[in-house]
Amino acid sequence: MQPPFLTSAPAKVILFGEHSAVYGKHAIAASIHSLRTYLYVTSTADNAITLNFPDIKLYHTWESSSLSKIPSPSASIKIDDTIDQQVAEQIQNLIRESNIVDPLHTNAAFCFLYLYKCLIPNTSSLKFTMVSTSPIGAGLGSSAAVSVALSYAMLQLANQQTNKKLINKWAFVGEKCIHGNPSGVDNLVSTHGGAILYKKGTEAKLLDLSNNPLEILLTYTKVPRSTKTLVSNVRQLYEIYPDIITPVLDSMDSIACKASHILTQNEPDFQPIASLVDINQGLLQSLGVSHEAIAKICLLSEQLHIGPTKLTGAGGGGCTLTLIQDSTNLQKFKETLTNTYGFDTIETQLGGDGCLLVSNDDLNGGVIKQLDKLFEESKSNKVDRDIIDSLLLPGPNQKLPWK
Ligand code: PMV
């Protein structure tokens, strides 16, 4: 497909099974429809590739001559999702030569360039501008949404027959570039949307939560952390104490399986789910991935009788989810989290669309002008979430023909 066009992918929340998912245990995750990443692909006349990722302040242009020096990953590597280490090394060299040093920038650039080399190695004169309404590095799968949006866009540019399986496959490769050894749950749920029961290497099971719309409050602690570091800390613990950590991971597996059984029944019974949230948080804490800020939210939700809280995503800060069992003190809970601790609270519904596309055929001149303006403005000023949503958010009142 020729530019301009747009792709989009949602953030996600892991209800149960973060970290244990990396060890092949079950996890339950759901997409968050309204928190999305949007990628706008446009043509340029400069025989170069430009990245505008204002949310992380990454702006860079590579001449096609410098990109063409890097070989493409070998065909066999392209089939089995592994990262071609020789190509990876050359890309890392280019990133260093480009004076890109911030870890957030190097990860994003590596993900972009590796997918570029795999999928559209001979293309140039393109600009990729990305904006997101989801907090970055918060445990809500922002990197997976970025990988999915990039994978979808590059498959379109490569004129490949796209389906969700292929988009997810390349998004997983992108996630590997960012996280090293991801479980694959984030990219899967961001690609497909809805809610899933996931186990690495097996077919994911789609969960219908329509009988059990969980009421959840997400809290963003704003404490920065790195998924890669937290996952590798757990790995170290596992390697030192395999006989102690294995049962912890097995318990997390049982929690995810039990929860998926309860959540898909006709008669909702939240009490066991509440116990499972509590137990899962205790187990995550024992793996060393909780944080003082998370502990404060757990305590407050208990004191105000809201319901149990657990971290979601990699932990170490990031986000928590609180199961709202009793909303009597919900306002006070939210106010204290915001005013006393400086956290953000996010009320949102779980599930909804996975990755989506607005093709160039569906964009008229007027809309392109609006998109150019919004994405251009995003380069210099943080564009308000409401403004992004009003033009880009898919849904019943959508302005763009998302498919
Ligand atoms: O914090 P996030 O959104 O990057 O989630 C990571 C989830 C982990 O289970 C910790 C890692 C993984 O790859 O599944």
Image (tube, rainbow, N blue to C red):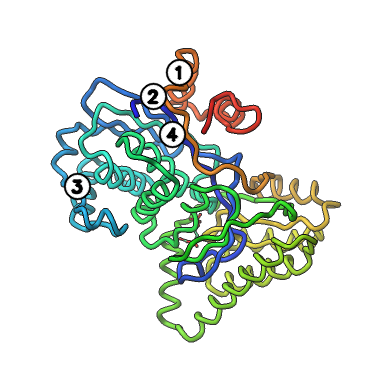
What is the C-alpha distance between the residues marked 2 and 3? 25 Å
Around disc 1, counting alpha carbons within 10 Å, would you say few (fewer than 14), some (14 to 19), or many (20 or more)?
Answer: some
Q: Quadrant of the N terminus?
A: top left
Report the residue that reaches farthest toward the right.
328
Q: Secondary structure at mark 4?
A: strand
- C-beta proximity under 8 Å, tags 1 and 2: yes
Give amino acid for label 1.
Answer: Ile
Q: Is residue 264 left or right of residue 87?
A: right
What is the C-alpha distance between the residues marked 4 and 3? 24 Å
Residue 4, label in figure: 2
Q: Position of residue 331 (x, y in %)?
A: 80, 46
Q: Camera-side residue: 29 or 97?
A: 29
Q: Secondary structure at mark 3?
A: loop
- Sequence-wise, the earlier of marks 1 and 2 is 2
Around disc 2, counting alpha carbons within 10 Å, would you say few (fewer than 14), some (14 to 19), or many (20 or more)?
Answer: many
- The residue at the point 23 percent across, 23 percent down is 46
Residue 368, label in figure: 1
Give amino acid for label 4.
Answer: Leu
- The residue at the point 30 percent across, 34 percent down is 60
Q: Position of residue 313 (x, y in %)?
A: 54, 58
Q: Which residue is mark 4?
A: 39
Vertical comparison of 62 with 391: above or below: below
- Sequence-wise, the earlier of marks 3 and 1 is 3
Q: Secondary structure at mark 1?
A: helix
Place residue 375 in its image quadrant: top left
Q: Is residue 271 left or right of residue 373?
A: right
